[in-house]
Image (cartoon, rainbow, N blue to C red):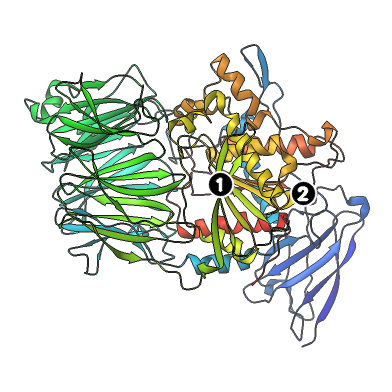
Amino acid sequence: MRRLVQRFNLPLGPPPFTSFVKQKNASKLIPFILPTTAYLVQPSFFTANLRSEQLSTLRAMGSLPESNGNLRPKLAFTVPTVGSRQKPDAMPYQFEVVPLKSQALPPIYPKVDRDETCIDNLHGHEVADPYRPLEDPKSKITQDFVESQVQLTKSVLLTCDTQEMLRERITAIYDFPKHSCPYRRGSKYFYTYNSGLQAQSVLYVQNKLDEDGQVLLDPNTWIHDGTISLALTRFSVDAKYLAFGQSASGSDWVNIKVMDVEVKVVLQDTLLWVKFSSLAWTHDNRGFFYNRYPEPTKDSIEDAGTETETNLFHELYYHFLGTDQSEDILCWRDSEHAQWLSYAEVTDDGQYLALSIEEGCDPVNRLYYCDLSALPHGLEGLRQNNEQLPFVKLVDNFDAQYELVANEGSIFTFLTNKDAPRYKLTRVNVEDPSSWKDVVPESKTDVLTSADLVNKQQLVLCYMSDVKHLLKLHNLQSGAMLHSLPLEIGSVAEISGRPEDSEFFYSFTSFLTPGTIYRCDLSTGTPDVTVLKETKIANLDRSLFETRQVFVPSKDKTKVPMFVVARKGLVLDGNHPALLYGYGGFNVSLTPSFSVSRLVLAQHFGAVIAIANIRGGGEYGEKWHKAGSLANKQNCFDDFIACGEYLVKEGYTQSKKLCIEGGSNGGLLVAACINQRPDLYGCALAHVGVMDMLRFHKFTIGHAWTSDYGCADNAEEFDWLIKYSPLHNVKRPWENGSESIQYPATMLLTADHDDRVVPLHSLKLLATLQYELCTSVENSKQTNPIIARIDTKAGHGSGRPTKKIIDEMVDAYSFFAKMTDSKWVD
């Protein structure tokens, strides 16, 4: 085939310059017209891809005149018609601009106005907040800023040449069946299943385990793009009804509906403004308890999930089936404590309602109960008398956590950290609350993470030992251990069972195991464990990889566990790209879990994957959590930095090939660490992070995080926060005597419906980074790009359809590969 070339001029302002258009593998030129504009990533060299449904890809290449190198390029040009073809016959096209070279110069960043007059006086300190206008998601300044950043990020991602290879490979491996543990309600079994690439998992029902399930509820039928997810499910005791929640675009707001299970018909019942809700059916199957907030009144919410107003006065209601929400009975509302949250649970015998009251995210709660059988006129009497439920306050302080495990009449068994930072089981007769008795004492080494009653008198206890799970059976009455259950090194993802059943189910996962579901039969007295479902991935050879656990000395010599996943036989020569992931907060433990995208990085880029179990998490109980919260938050960053230094020192990688990643509190972790040690990393991926530590408590549910962070309204806690708040600690590293140091290539990831950590956190930090490091200085040393991936119809992470999950993986990890100069190997 001949390759024809046509010359034409590209006017970019005086003077025009010559460029070329080539059509590959074609015997003649096809005419088209190209009026368009776009941002350039690289102001000196460019290539443009011209695509249409009818045409093969055309590519235009050229260079800007030196005199125009500082021009903010809005590139506009027209390709003339050829021969006898006229402009009206031109074909549709898409336009992309891609650098010819690797980026040696920084991107040209969109500008946003700064409000230099916005200064807060906090405890005698003047704190500037010039990007406060970006806190309003509906303002034109915010919308224009977001749109310009989206275009910038698209142009940068066009330089990431492994995108399509990553997309193809991740999609292929992600296409495997995903099952939940079955759980029994009434006489039926229920479970969720995704055939592989379905947008959302589907809820199935079956009469017997060896029968094929039938579709009960398919969220994929709710909307064409899969952005409405199934957020909550609770069956009535007789399994005749299902109360379920729908979440749109990943928002924390949920609409509750009810289905008649037998005929698979959704009823008229609809409950709105539900958030952070429990669902608890009464045993007469007439209705259920749920939590909601008062309907917002400020400017009315047109698109729930995009607002930033704080969530106050979490209420508990009871809904009778077949009635309007306006008739629901208010059962609990604390008018004196607007920020507290509540969670309700009906005991297994149906007699009591247990109410857990929380003031934040700390593992502590008050515990109240109400004897439902003692209500003289039932729940209807509350409406008649305009009364709330008469709760008895069993625990009326925030000294410890009490999680209900079981009850035998008035004798309640709890999982607690009361005087037991690694947790224990304790028991009390609620009619004589002065006497508590430990049933299973605190372990000397391991953390008790969950307890479930099965087979009437047996407890399934899950322990965590050096960040790996163990399963044990104990006697409910004596607390004595009966059996240890077989388990490989990894995590128990789910446990499902009922007190009245002699069987229960649990699922296992690890870094190299996508999922195995076990059935444990206790009918003979000896546990009989069999594999119910084992997930296998045909196009991934897990034997290529190995997992090891190391213990890294932190700044204060504390040993921090870290998992390392890599190809077998990895040569520790420092030349491998590495991805270091962390969280470190809110008592959350990062136990082994399966990740398609990370294994793709390990297989095709030779990447080392490291998961750091830093302080602030729950890996070693409440002491480990407290060692990384409040005044001790800096320990989290020191631990994470130490893990990065370890990977470099031991030859796994080098600084310019080390990427750090985290989400939510982990996004804060990443942002704080690039502020404190920009020299240690080559790339950073900060997902939905808490970036403004002085104002986070003012938006949606942010006030609940003060239990882990503190609050800037308090002078002492302000002093903690101002020292590491990402937004307030951006500095030019080259001005401290290290001219060769700059910030790593950074991608902040957020979404328009994230009403947990609202997007303003990432937007304000993005504007600050781009201004302080790039646009406010001449000849900036910051050539690594600072960009943001801003998703739409998505939230904090939960409920995303499969395509959005894959799209984010591809964008984030192709950026990682490009910025660490990692090469794809088939």
Query: Which one is closest to the eye, mark 1 or mark 2?
Result: 1
The residue depicted at 13 percent of the width and 50 percent of the height is: 238
Q: Dot 2: few (<14), some (14–19), or many (≥20) neighbours within 10 Å?
A: many
Q: Which residue is mark 1?
A: 562
Please give the residue where the numbered disc 2 appears in the rendered image: 107
Give the side of residue 432 with respect to residue 816, left or right.
left
Pinpoint residue 820: horizontal percent, then vertical percent: 72, 55
Q: x, y (%) of residue 802?
A: 46, 59
Taking the view exactly as shown, the residue that stands out farthest to the top is 124
Horizontally, residue 14 falls left or right of residue 102, namely right
9 on left or right of 144: right
Return the residue nearer the eye: 53 or 80: 53
- Residue at 77% x, 80% y is 29
Which numbered disc covers residue 322? none
**Residue in the picture at 19% in, 37% down:** 478
Residue 324 in which image quadrant = top left
Q: Secondary structure at mark 1?
A: strand
Q: Is residue 351 above or below residue 201?
A: above
Kind of residue sitting beneath label 2? Pro
Front-most of residues 117 and 120: 120
Dot 1 amino acid type: Met
Whether residue 613 is visible, yes or no, is: yes
Circles 1 and 2, Cβ within 8 Å, touching? The answer is no
The C terminus - image quarter: bottom right
Looking at the image, how many numbered discs can be counted on the residues?
A: 2
